[in-house]
Image: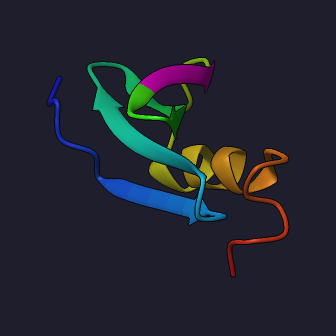
Amino acid sequence: MSNHALEVFEVSDGFVRVFAGVYAENDGFFAEIHEQRDGAIRRLDKSDIMPSREIAEAWVQSRSWFKNNVA
């Protein structure tokens, strides 16, 4: 597994930054969504293992933080 995201998504309103990464795992792909507020970062959500990168990317885009912000 790599610590580097294959794909990164980000939205910000100037005060809160929400970002997600899609990562490769030995048996598939997964995604994590994090929030950065006042210099602190916390994980908001993490997907299960998914069979393809495209499905993991679609999972991120379906989450409320990105649904209306990702083309």
Q: Position of residue 23 (x, y in %)?
A: 34, 37
Viewed as shown, does residue 59 lie left or right of 68?
left
Which quadrant of the figure has residue 13? Answer: bottom right
Residue toward you, 10 or 6 = 10
Viewed as shown, does residue 17 lie left or right of 7?
right
Q: Position of residue 22 (x, y in %)?
A: 42, 43
Q: Which residues are magenta?
A: 41-46
Q: Position of residue 18 (x, y in %)?
A: 57, 47
Identified at 42% across, 25% down, the residue is 40
Q: Main secondary structure of the magenta part?
A: strand
Viewed as shown, does residue 71 lie left or right of 49?
right
- Can residue 46 be seen? no
- Can residue 26 be seen? yes
Identified at 46% across, 49% down, the residue is 53
Q: Position of residue 65 (x, y in %)?
A: 76, 50
Identified at 55% across, 56% down, the residue is 54
Quadrant of the frame with the N terminus: top left
Viewed as shown, does residue 68 lie left or right of 14?
right
Quadrant of the frame with the C terminus: bottom right
Q: Is residue 21 magenta?
A: no
* Snapshot colouring: rainbow
Which residue is farthest bottom? 71
Residue toward you, 44 or 3 = 44
Vertical placement of 41 versus 59: above or below? Answer: above
